[in-house]
Amino acid sequence: MLQANFDQLIVAHGYVNQPVAPGLDLIQEINRLKKEKNAVILGHYYITGELQDISDFLGDSLALAQAAQKTEADLIVFVGVHFMGETAKILNPNKKVVVPDMNAGCSLASSAPADAFQAFKDQHPNHKVISYINCSAEIKALSDVIVTSSNAMKIVESFPKDQPLIFAPDKNLGNYINSVTGREMVLWDGACMVHEKYSLEKIVALMDEHPKAIFIAHPECEKQVLLVADFIGSTTALLNYVAQSDKKEFIVATESGILHQMQKSCPDKTFIPAPSIDSTCGCNDCSFMKLNTIQKLYLALKYERPEIILDPVILEKAKLPILRMLELS
Ligand code: 13P
Ligand code: SF4
């Protein structure tokens, strides 16, 4: 009861809504609080450059899950989106996991509600369920194994060829894996609102304008975009690719936050964000990832709120397929 009152006072609208003293050096305070509380900040490549630079560990979804599994911190502050915080909590049921803003969801994760997914599963008996990590804890609990874009191909191929498979919730990643492996996985009809907005027409026009540029894309992009890509990979794979390439110019089809790391590791190279269908909006930004701000991060660390809390039964069920993934990675 006391806890509920505290939360109502501190957390409003899904994040800590408290005033911050004007002129307070937030970076300095975050660093001080981190030491004092033995906290770790885990950040995804899609958050702002400022937040990337203050993260203790920055990575793609797989590396972040691995970091969460290994951490010795008492408090985990996850700067990314909700399913990532949930994954960290599932791997650390006895630790406190907080996020700067509970509203930082994911269009892919919300495309698969648990009830509808259970019904879909029931329609496909004998199928094993492979779920992309961008899904809720409830969907993970209904899955046999979890994958990320880094290890999806390898994990799918670890199943016998004659094993019927469901792949959820990203139909684009599922389609891509089907096309490379020759499998016929049954796909859940979900997509990422950032990656499905790239305009093939505009990308091709940009490639004509920059004939020396290499076009790289995340596998969450639609099939027609992936077909013209020179390289397809997870955020980490894209980063490694540009760092190792002797080419100087790249057109990048994934969330714009990644450009910060690309530019940092390759200051002499040029990175052009791939154009979206609607050029008037910030379509290359994930509006969920961008809900994270330095002020919300500071407040989350200070008040240790909002906290990821999971039903213990769901947590236990969701843990198995994540551990299976980590073993296979
Ligand atoms: P990765 O970082 O695993 O490539 O995933 C991208 C993504 O969409 C995260 O939400
Ligand atoms: Fe979800 Fe797409 Fe945002 Fe990644 S970029 S968190 S898949 S909505």
Image (cartoon, rainbow, N blue to C red):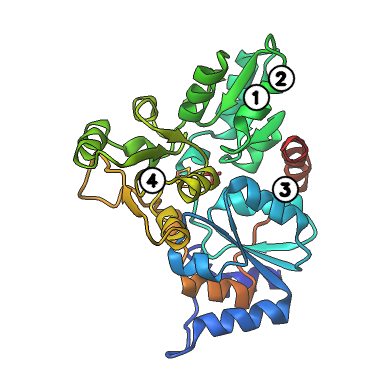
Which structural element holds mark 2?
loop
Residue 152: x, y in percent? Answer: 61, 31
- Going from the N terminus, do you reach mark 2 or mark 3 first? 2
Q: What residue is disc 4 on? A: 247
Residue at 60 percent across and 65 percent down: it is 306
- Going from the N terminus, do you reach mark 1 or mark 4 first? 1
Q: Amino acid at mark 4?
A: Lys
The image quadrant that residue 153 belongs to is: top right
Mark toward the viewer: 2 or 4: 4
Q: Amino acid at mark 3?
A: Asp
| Alpha carbon separation for disc pair 1 and 4 | 32 Å
Residue 42: x, y in percent? Answer: 61, 61
Q: Amino acid at mark 2?
A: Phe
Q: Nearer the viewer, residue 257 or 6?
A: 257
| Alpha carbon separation for disc pair 3 and 4 | 49 Å
> Is the shortest distance between ligand 2 and the CB of mark 3 under 8 Å?
no
Residue at 23 percent across and 42 percent down: it is 210
Q: Amino acid at mark 1?
A: Val
| Alpha carbon separation for disc pair 2 and 3 | 30 Å
Left or right, residue 311 beside residue 136: right
Q: Residues within 10 Å of mark 1 (few under 14, many from 20)?
A: many
Q: Residues within 10 Å of mark 4 (few under 14, many from 20)?
A: few
Mark toward the viewer: 1 or 4: 4
Q: What residue is disc 2 on? A: 159
Q: Is residue 187 above or below residue 19?
A: above
- Going from the N terminus, do you reach mark 2 or mark 4 first? 2
Residue 180: x, y in percent? Answer: 52, 20
Q: What residue is disc 1 on? A: 156
> Is the shortest distance between ligand 1 and the CB of mark 4 under 8 Å?
no
